[in-house]
Image (cartoon, helix red, strand yellow):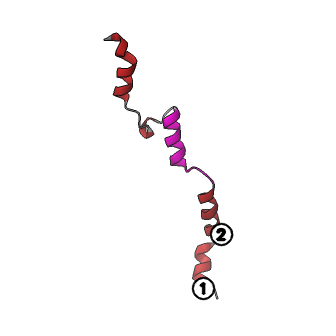
Amino acid sequence: MTDRNEIDTRFTVAGTDIEEVKRKNAESGLSYKEVLEQLAKTGGYGTKAYSDTNVEQVKKQIHKHLH
């Protein structure tokens, strides 16, 4: 027999099964943060905070012919 409290925490007021939503979200693909990280790695506007690019190294590479 299912505890009433368990039912109250598993479903929203509208009747949505929270555990089912969590399961589907886990199977759905990239998270918001993962998308931002991917954009930063492949080039995307406003993604500097997520980038692992060494800016100084890139500058040296670009300007190496000037020295």
In which image quadrant can residue 48 be found?
A: top left
Instruction: Identify residue for label 2.
Output: 17
Depicted 54 relative to depicted 29: above or below: above
Which amino acid, mark 1?
Asp
Which mark sits nearer the N-terminus, 2 or 1? 1
The residue carrying pointer 1 sits among few (fewer than 14), some (14 to 19) or many (20 or more) residues within 10 Å by Cα, namely few
Q: Residue at x 60, y 77 (%)?
A: 8
Instruction: Tell me where the magenta segment starts and ends, as one range.
Output: 28-42
Q: Nearer the viewer, residue 34 or 47?
A: 34
The residue carrying pointer 2 sits among few (fewer than 14), some (14 to 19) or many (20 or more) residues within 10 Å by Cα, namely some
Q: Residue at x 39, y 25 (%)?
A: 58
Q: Residue at x 43, y 37 (%)?
A: 51
Q: Which mark is residue 3?
A: 1
- At which x and y percent is residue 55? 37, 28
Q: Which mark is residue 50?
A: none
- At which x and y percent is residue 10? 61, 73
The Cα–Cα distance between marks 2 and 1, rounded to whole angstroms, is: 16 Å
- At which x and y percent is residue 31? 55, 51
Q: Residue furthest right?
A: 15
Which amino acid, mark 2?
Asp
Q: Residue at x 61, y 51 (%)?
A: 29
- Provide the secondary structure element on which disc 2 rests: loop
Q: Is residue 39 magenta?
A: yes
- Cβ atoms at labels 2 and 1 below 8 Å apart: no
